[in-house]
Image: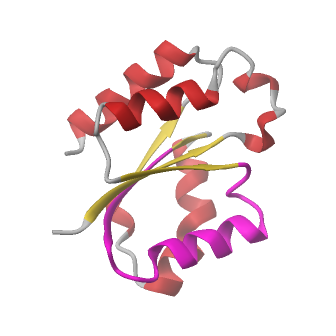
Amino acid sequence: MGKKGFILCVCQGTCPSFSKMDIFGVLSDVRREKLFDYVVLHPQLCVGDGEEFMKVLLSGDETEKLYIAACDPQMQCKMYRDAFEAVGFDKTHHFALDIRNKTTEEAVAAIKQLVELNP
């Protein structure tokens, strides 16, 4: 069985929509909960190096499911499509969550719910 991975993308950490959230607190909380096999922080997945990161991360076929907390889920599907196709990652195994404008606690609760709904 493949690994469950989690990426927290924070729009460079400067976007006002992340100002109520302690991003390291979110990562620590979900890591401690053991919801995922690994957790990653990325500053901006939607740019060129973000796509390259996704290709490298997923190229080993070890990740079966990838949960990404970032911006609008529809935008995520569009932004990551090329990277998923390039490495043969099944896009139906990508679970997107919008965590903008949430507090640390709200973000963690939303991530937990995402995993419960998509085990």
Q: Is residue 91 above or below residue 102?
A: below
Describe the colour scheme in one phrase.
secondary structure
Q: Residue at x 73, y 52 (%)?
A: 44
Q: Residue at x 22, y 34 (%)?
A: 116
Image quarter in which the C terminus is found: top left
Q: Which residue is drawn at 75% across and 19% down?
A: 19
Q: Residue at x 55, y 24 (%)?
A: 25
Q: Is residue 19 above or below residue 117?
A: above
Q: Where is residue 68 in the image (x, y as percent from the top left)?
A: 49, 48
Residue in front for this viewpoint, 4 or 93: 4
Reply yes or no: does residue 57 show up in magenta: yes
Q: Where is residue 102 in the image (x, y as percent from the top left)?
A: 58, 17
Q: In this view, does 64 lie above or below 34?
A: below
Q: Looking at the image, which residue sits at the far left? A: 1
Q: Is residue 71 left or right of residue 58?
A: right
Residue in front for this viewpoint, 29 or 50: 29
Residue in front for this viewpoint, 33 or 87: 33
Q: Is residue 19 left or right of residue 9?
A: right
